[in-house]
Image: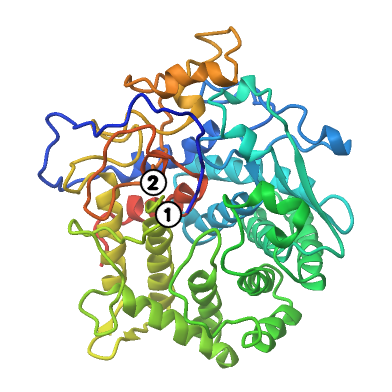
């Protein structure tokens, strides 16, 4: 879905690179624990701001240290969304929600050191998100002009492009970003509750305020004329803000157990489109995730007033089962979930996550899903998720791991500025905006391995050309990785699920 554009013309290198000697047999074993560690480590490569002493991705250095200056506000920190140097608030908040949900559902399966690393990854985001909602009736939704940024191929440490700050002030609306930020802070408050209750309380308090902003001034942030040119077409709100309002309220309900949020998702479901059975889940569309999240109250709490959400979740699960009469998800010949639009693996990772979460909810209550011509239990859902995970890790027609640094065969030329340019440690001299083009157009592998990064992935024919230019396939994003953290935690603990 990411429409990161490059203005280098002509491209000197557009070709399909064949991986010599790739094993085309499927491996029968995956080291899910290793993949889990790497999926979390990836986030250190995306960090903006002042890096700590214990930074493990040593080829990265400080960047974006003046972010926020034009508002006389500290907006340092947070994550670059993908292979560029922009901090987009909408996908960053969703990334944070999914990292937190990964810890909430599967954190008890993680080795203690990886649980710590996951919480550090969440906090790098939440510390920043707290800054974005620190002023009354204002939310900072983005730092960096993407149109200027995308015309450069430049290390984040060298950035000399405009660090434009995009803010929305009431009564102008930003329901989507503000409600997703509320979801992120509420979910994160649950992740931190047992280890840092004071921080958890701060997160929840700010989540409540962020949701009030979202609900009181309804509308999409990209409809604001002063914001639109900076967020579109990159992270425009294509699917409407209504799903984020329900999603934010559902997370606040789960984090606070406050009945007012229960009433909100009961009473606003129809008007905010909860009954629109949209089988998608990602940074822009929360419907399928919302239905799974709310179903927990029905399955485990007998909250039958929310039955319609569970019915939608059941319906979604049935679409994912190839033997079901209502199956209609598209798969590649090699078995990968496929949706057109680029960065396809974001769908495979989010859907795998929902399959596992729903399987857990069903298993705890000894329930199954009625898919018309068959009854589907937790084991079937887990096996569907495992097929996606194993495909990503190498069980695919290319014999290629789509996670950088995992196995012996992985993408070498990912669409990522910091990875593809020499590090400041190896090349201390400044590399200006257009001077990076020689590295962008080079056929050489990236000098810095962005361990754990999951790229956009192959096309509908299962083919992947290791091509830096083809950003729809070769660009990693934070929101591809975030749900995969929870998925890998589950399979590291349950490599042979039933």
What residue is rendered at 69% in x and 69% in y? 252
Closer to the camera in the image, 329 or 79: 329
> Whole-percent x and y of residue 460?
26, 55
What residue is rendered at 48% in x and 55% in y? 108
In the shown orientation, is residue 187 left or right of residue 168?
left
Q: Which mark is residue 486?
A: none
Check the image and report above or below for 16 versus 435: below
| Residue 387 sits in quarter | bottom left
Q: Which mark is residue 456?
A: 2
Distance of mark 2 from mark 1, alpha carbons? 7 Å
What residue is rendered at 55% in x and 20% in y? 434
> Whole-percent x and y of residue 159?
65, 24
Residue 365 visible in image: no
In the shown orientation, is residue 372 left or right of residue 106?
left
The disc, 2 or 1, on the residue closer to the chain's N-terminal end is: 1
Neighbourhood count class around disc 2 (C-alpha, 10 Å): few under 14, some 14–19, many 20 upward:
many
Which residue is disc 1 drawn over?
346
Q: Residue furthest front?
A: 10
In the picture, the quarter occupied by the C terminus is bottom left
Element type at marker 1?
helix
What residue is rendered at 51% in x and 33% in y? 7
The answer to whether the residue labelled 2 contacts the one labelled 1, judged by CB atoms less than 8 Å apart, is yes
Closer to the camera in the image, 177 or 165: 165
> Whole-percent x and y of residue 238?
57, 64
Neighbourhood count class around disc 1 (C-alpha, 10 Å): few under 14, some 14–19, many 20 upward:
many
Check the image and report above or below for 256 versus 318: above
| Residue 236 sits in quarter | bottom right
| Residue 306 sits in quarter | bottom right
Closer to the camera in the image, 190 or 232: 232
In the shown orientation, is residue 336 left or right of residue 452?
left
Check the image and report above or below for 67 versus 209: above
């Amino acid at each position: 879905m990411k429409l990161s554009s490059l203005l280098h013309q002509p491209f000197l290198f557009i070709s399909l690179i064949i991986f010599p000697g790739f094993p085309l047999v499927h491996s029968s074993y995956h080291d899910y624990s290793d993949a889990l560690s790497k999926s979390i480590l990836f986030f250190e490569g995306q960090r903006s701001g002042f890096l700590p002493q214990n930074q493990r991705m040593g080829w990265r250095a400080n960047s974006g240290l003046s972010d926020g200056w034009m508002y006389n506000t500290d907006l340092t920190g947070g994550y670059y969304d993908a292979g560029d140097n922009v901090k987009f608030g909408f996908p960053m908040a969703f990334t944070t929600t999914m990292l937190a949900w990964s810890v909430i559902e599967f954190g008890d399966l993680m080795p203690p050191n990886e649980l710590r690393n996951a919480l550090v990854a969440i906090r790098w985001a939440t510390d920043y998100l707290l800054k974005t909602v620190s002023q009354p009736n204002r939310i900072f939704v983005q730092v960096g002009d993407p149109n200027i940024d995308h015309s450069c191929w430049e290390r984040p440490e060298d950035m000399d492009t405009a660090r434009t700050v995009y803010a929305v002030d009431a009564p102008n609306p930003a329901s989507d970003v503000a409600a997703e930020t509320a979801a992120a802070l509420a979910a994160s408050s649950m992740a931190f509750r047992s280890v840092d209750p004071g921080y958890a309380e701060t997160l929840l308090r700010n989540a409540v305020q962020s949701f009030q902003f979202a609900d009181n001034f309804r509308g999409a942030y990209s409809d604001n004329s002063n914001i639109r040119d900076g967020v579109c077409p990159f992270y425009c709100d294509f699917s409407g803000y209504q799903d984020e309002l329900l999603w934010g309220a559902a997370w606040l309900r789960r984090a606070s157990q406050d009945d007012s949020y229960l009433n909100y998702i009961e009473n606003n479901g129809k008007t905010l489109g909860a009954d629109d059975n949209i089988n998608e889940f990602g940074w822009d569309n929360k419907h399928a995730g919302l239905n799974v999240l709310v179903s927990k109250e029905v399955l485990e709490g007998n909250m039958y007033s929310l039955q319609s959400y569970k019915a939608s979740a059941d319906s979604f699960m049935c679409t994912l089962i190839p033997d079901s009469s209502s199956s209609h998800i598209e798969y590649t010949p090699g078995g990968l979930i496929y949706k057109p639009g680029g960065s396809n693996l974001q769908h495979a990772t989010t859907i795998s996550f929902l399959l596992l979460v729903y399987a857990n909810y069903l298993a705890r209550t000894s329930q199954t899903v009625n898919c018309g011509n068959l009854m589907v239990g937790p084991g079937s859902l887990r096996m569907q998720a495992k097929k996606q995970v194993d495909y990503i890790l190498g069980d695919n027609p290319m014999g290629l791991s789509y996670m950088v640094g995992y196995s012996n065969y992985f993408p070498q030329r990912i669409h990522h500025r910091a990875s593809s340019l020499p590090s400041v440690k190896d090349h201390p001299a400044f590399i200006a905006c257009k001077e990076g083009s020689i590295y962008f157009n080079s056929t050489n592998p990236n000098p810095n391995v962005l361990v754990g990064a999951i790229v956009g992935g192959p096309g509908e024919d299962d083919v992947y050309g290791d091509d830096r230019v083809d950003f729809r396939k070769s660009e990693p994003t934070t929101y591809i990785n975030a749900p995969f953290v929870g998925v890998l935690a589950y399979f590291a603990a349950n490599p042979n699920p039933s």
